[in-house]
């Protein structure tokens, strides 16, 4: 039995978790800063760093207490090294190094996106490999080939805005609040998603890349042309705004699913993975499952608790790295642009 403490502070969630053998979650604690950043319509890096400093010790203490294990019982300490906001990452990295030093435990660096991929293994166990993983979040929209657990080969990524970033910016433009993904998902339910014709740019050079800056601009131009003011009362959103966001969401989801299906047709995986914060979107989950059925492939989507940023996925990825011999010294530093694959 190997118990791994995972620590995640890449953006605006302070999280810690203890996971057994990369599969069984003994505790998972997440302190969200959504309310802190909501007035600004997005994450303010300086505020995020300050709140991580305030929250990191209580969150780790809660995770250890809920797990029922003590620091000497741990096999390793895993921490998100990157990518992310450098100030936020540093808080988690320093905390992990301190724990590893004091208790004499191996320190395992984890890539944030690898954590999202491993969330599918954490939730569903061993998956048919090779797999294709579509990772969709506020900062990442990428497709990875996973030939074996712990190995990731980048096939495509966004060339500009990530899908989650586009959701946030459209929500901010319309005065719908932050984070944008959940509110747009809710408002789109039952609305007319054919009301506005939005198109997402298609990459024509053969790579499985995405681009969402164009649709963000298209929404802006539509709002200006139609004279749509920001929503004054979030509890009373006009029908035309609901139809607008439903049309926007449909276009983005269609582009994501089309990209995954195209990559699957080319690389012939044995299974598909849909993960990351935007994988909480109800339409994306439904359309991803539909596309998988059409392709005759199983698709594995983590539960909502493991799609948004959390430390259980970091502990799971850390367990994989630990088994593969990944170790870091106390010179470990945050890497805001850390590549994967």
Image (spheres, rainbow, N blue to C red):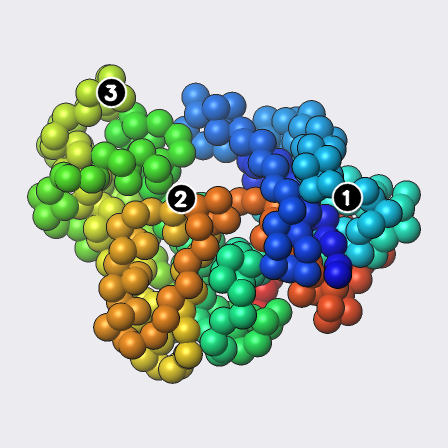
Residue count near mark 3 (Cα–Cα under 10 Å), binned few <14, some 14–19, many ≥20 = few
For marks 1 and 3 on the same chain, the one whose residue lies earlier in the sequence = 1
Q: Quadrant of the C terminus?
A: bottom right
* Closer to the eye: label 2 or 1: 1
Measure how far apart labels 2 and 3 are at the Cα level: 23 Å
**Label 3 sits on residue:** 235
Displayed quadrant of residue 208? bottom left
Local secondary structure at mark 3: loop
Q: Is residue 208 above or below residue 315?
A: below
Q: Secondary structure at mark 1?
A: loop
Q: Position of residue 165 (x, y in %)?
A: 40, 44
Element type at mark 2 = helix
Specify whether 111 is left or right of 190.
right
Task: Provide the residue designation for mark 1.
Answer: 69
Q: Position of residue 199 (x, y in %)?
A: 19, 55
Residue visible at 82% across and 44% down in the picture: 71
Residue 281, how many percent across, how many down?
33, 47
């Amino acid at each position: 039995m190997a118990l791994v403490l995972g620590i995640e502070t890449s953006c605006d969630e302070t999280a810690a978790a203890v996971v057994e053998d990369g599969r069984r979650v003994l505790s998972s604690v997440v302190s969200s800063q959504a309310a802190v950043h909501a007035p600004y319509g997005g994450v303010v890096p300086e505020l995020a760093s300050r709140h991580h400093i305030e929250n990191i010790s209580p969150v780790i203490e809660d995770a250890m207490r809920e797990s029922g294990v003590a620091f000497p019982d741990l096999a390793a300490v895993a921490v998100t090294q990157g990518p992310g906001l450098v100030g936020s990452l540093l808080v988690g990295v320093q905390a992990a190094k301190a724990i590893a030093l004091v208790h004499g435990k191996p320190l395992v660096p984890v890539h944030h996106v690898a954590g999202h991929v491993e969330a599918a293994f954490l939730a569903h166990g061993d998956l048919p490999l090779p797999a294709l993983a579509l990772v969709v979040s506020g900062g990442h929209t990428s497709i990875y080939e996973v030939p074996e657990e712990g190995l990731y080969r980048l096939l495509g990524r966004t060339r500009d805005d990530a899908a989650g970033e586009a959701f946030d910016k459209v929500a901010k433009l319309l005065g719908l609040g932050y984070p944008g993904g959940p509110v747009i998902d809710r408002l789109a339910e039952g609305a007319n998603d054919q009301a506005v014709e939005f198109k997402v740019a298609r990459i024509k050079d053969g790579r499985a890349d995405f681009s969402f800056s164009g649709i963000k601009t298209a929404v802006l131009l539509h709002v200006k042309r139609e004279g749509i003011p920001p929503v004054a009362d979030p509890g009373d959103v006009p029908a035309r705004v609901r139809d607008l966001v439903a049309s926007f969401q449909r276009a983005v989801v269609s582009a994501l699913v089309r990209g995954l299906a195209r990559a699957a047709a080319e690389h012939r995986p044995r299974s598909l993975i849909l993960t990351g914060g935007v994988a909480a979107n109800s339409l994306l989950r439904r359309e991803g499952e539909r596309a998988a059925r059409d392709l005759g492939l199983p698709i594995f989507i983590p539960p909502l608790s493991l799609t948004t940023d959390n430390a259980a996925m970091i502990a799971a990825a850390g367990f994989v790295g630990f088994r593969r011999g990944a170790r870091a010294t106390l010179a470990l530093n945050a890497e805001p642009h850390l590549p994967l694959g």
